[in-house]
Amino acid sequence: MQPRDIRIGVQIAPQHAPAYGVLRDAVRRMEDLGVDLVMGWDHFFPLTGDRDGAHFEAFTVLAAIAEQSTRVEFGPLVSATAFRNPDLVADMARTIDHISAHDTGTGRFILGLGAGWNEKDFAEYGYDFGTVGSRLSAFEAAVPRIRERLGRLNPPPTRHLPILIGGGGERRTLRVVAEHADIWHAFGDVETLAHKVRVLTEHCEAVGRDVSEIEFSTGTSVRGLGVGDPETAERFVELGFTTFILAITPPELDDTALRALLRWRDERSC
C-alpha cells in the first residue's frame, strides 16, 4: 500500500450557533481554508457551556454540507448506533453520499460510528442507556448490519463508502475496528495511542487483516481531549497516524491551532 498523505480536518460542533447560517458559513470558510475533512458530531445537546443551549441535529446538517461543499470529505465524528435503525443509517449515509456527488459523480461522505456515551442524549430522547457492555453489544451487531445494507441498496453508494470507527476500547471496540473500519479515530497522548496501535495490530492479525489498510486518525475535542500541535503530530506520524481532526465550536470558531496544522501539512509536502 502506498504511503498515505497527511490530511487535516476540522470538527465543527453544531452547538451554541443561534442560527444554521453560522454553521453553513463556517463550513464554507473551512473549505476555502484548505481543510481535507469537515466533521460534525451526533449529539442532541451541547457538550460544553450551557448544556441546554442551541444545538442542531447531525444528519440533516450533514445533508446540507453535502449540497453546499464541493471538495472536502465529511461526516459525523461519530454517529451513535443506538440512535437509529442500522439499515436506516446505511440508507441515510448512501443518500448523503449521492447528494455530495453533485460535481464529480463521486461522493465524499464518511460514515463515522460509535457506541454512544452521553447519558443525557439517551435519556432525553427516550433511548435505553443501559450499560457500557449493552451499548457495545448493540454496536458490534449494528456495524456489520450497516455494511450489509450498504451492499444491497439500489442505487449503491457512489464509491466504497468509508466507515470510521471512533474509540479505543481494547477488547471490543478495537476488534470491531480490525474487522470493519476503513478509518480509526482515537484520542490520547503519544504513549497511549502507541499502545492502542499495538493492540489494534494484534486484533488485525487475529482476523487476518493487514493493519495498514486502516487509516489512523486523532486530534482534539471541544471537551479538551487529545492534542493537535505540529510538533506532537510529527510524533503521531511515526506511529502511522496521517489524519488529524481539530474541533472548533461556535460562537468563537477559533481556528488558530487548525491553521498551524495546515501550515505544517503544506510544509511537509514541499
Image: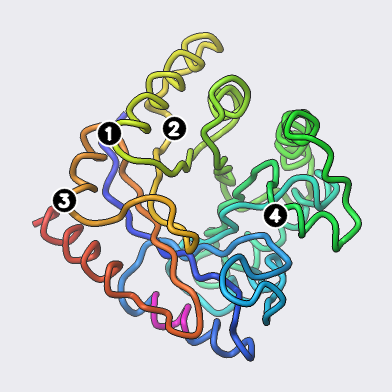
Q: Are marks 2 and 3 in contact (CB under 8 Å)?
A: no
Q: What is the distance, in whole Å, between disc 4 and disc 1 at their CAs? A: 27 Å
Give the magenta range. Answer: 26-30
Spatial distance from mark 1 to mark 3, Cα to Cα?
24 Å
First in sequence, mark 2 or 3: give its number.
Answer: 2
Residue corresponding to mark 2: 214
Q: Is residue 56 above or below residue 238?
A: below
- The percent position of residue 127, horizontal first and vertical second, equals 88, 51
Of marks 4 and 1, which one's residue comes earlier in the chain?
1
Residue 224 placement: quadrant = bottom left
Within 10 angstroms of label 2, few (less than 14), some, or many (20 or more) residues? some
Amino acid marked by disc 1: Gln
- The amino acid beneath tag 3 is Glu
Q: Amino acid at mark 4?
A: Arg
Point out the frontmost of discs 4 and 3. Answer: 3
Q: Quadrant of the C terminus?
A: bottom left
Q: Which residue is mark 4?
A: 94
Q: Position of residue 206 (x, y in %)?
A: 53, 9
Q: Mark 2 or mark 1, which is nearer to you?
A: 2
Q: Which is closer to the viewer, label 2 or label 4?
A: 2
| Badge nearest the viewer, 2 or 3 | 3
- Asked if the residue at tag 3 contacts the one at tag 4, i.e. Cβ–Cβ closer than 8 Å, the answer is no
Q: Please state if 220 lies on the left or on the right of 130 as rendered.
A: left
In terms of sequence position, does the residue under pointer 2 or pointer 4 come before the other?
Answer: 4
Q: Real-space Cα distance between discs 4 and 3?
A: 37 Å
Name which residue type carries label 2: Ile
* Quarter of the rendering occupied by the N terminus: top left
Is there a contact, CB below 8 Å, between mark 2 and mark 1? Answer: no
Q: Mark 3 falls on what kind of element?
A: helix
